[in-house]
Image: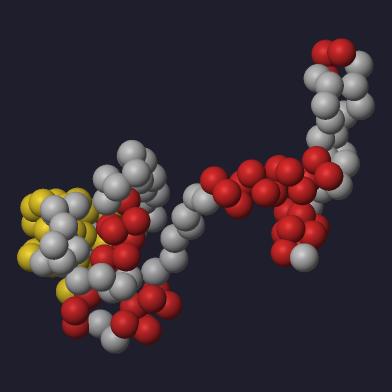
Amino acid sequence: MPGAAIEFRDVSFARPSRPRVLDHFSLAVGAGEVLALVGRSGAGKSTLLKLVNRLLLPVSGAVIVEDRDTRDWDPIRLRRRIGYVLHDGRVERRRRAAARALGGGSCGSAHDGAARPRRTSDRAVRDRVAR
């Protein structure tokens, strides 16, 4: 796709002595588009992200960012251009547990007259979880 912000062109990837995680994968994401990668563990979601910022290189095919093959980018400059957010269920569970410990949750439900949870900022939770 001409002008795609990120494009995978017939990309294959496998770790040494392992089966291919990606096999002739193609996808184009335009500037301003939002993409959510979902799938079972081991399906290749994190691998795709690592290929985009050149933490991994494809076995075949090309990963294109702003009309340039990622192999032609300086890795540091490329990584400064790319941002993504990974969901980590462990972090979410710790954040929710910390919010409850800080008074942000209750054992009862809103329907049985329990007090409404106090809003706790993410920063306050992160600071307490990090200790």
- In the displayed structure, does residue 20 sit left or right of residue 111? left
Way the structure is coloured? secondary structure
Quadrant of the image for the C terminus?
Answer: bottom right
Seen in the picture, residue 127 relative to 125 is either above or below; the reply is below
Look at 14% across and 54% down and name the residue there: 20
Q: Quadrant of residue 74?
A: bottom left
> Would you place residue 119 above or below residue 81 in this image?
above
Which quarter of the figure has residue 107?
top right
Return the x and y of residue 27 as percentages of the image width and height: 19, 51
| 56 relative position to 60: left or right | right
Visible in this render: residue 84? Answer: yes
* Place of residue 96 in the rendered image (x, y in percent of width and height, measured from the top left): 71, 43
Q: Quadrant of the N terminus?
A: bottom left
Q: Residue at x 25, y 82 (%)?
A: 73
Query: Compared to 59, does 24 lie above or below?
Result: above
Residue 72 drawn at (x, y percent): 19, 82
Residue at far top of view: 112
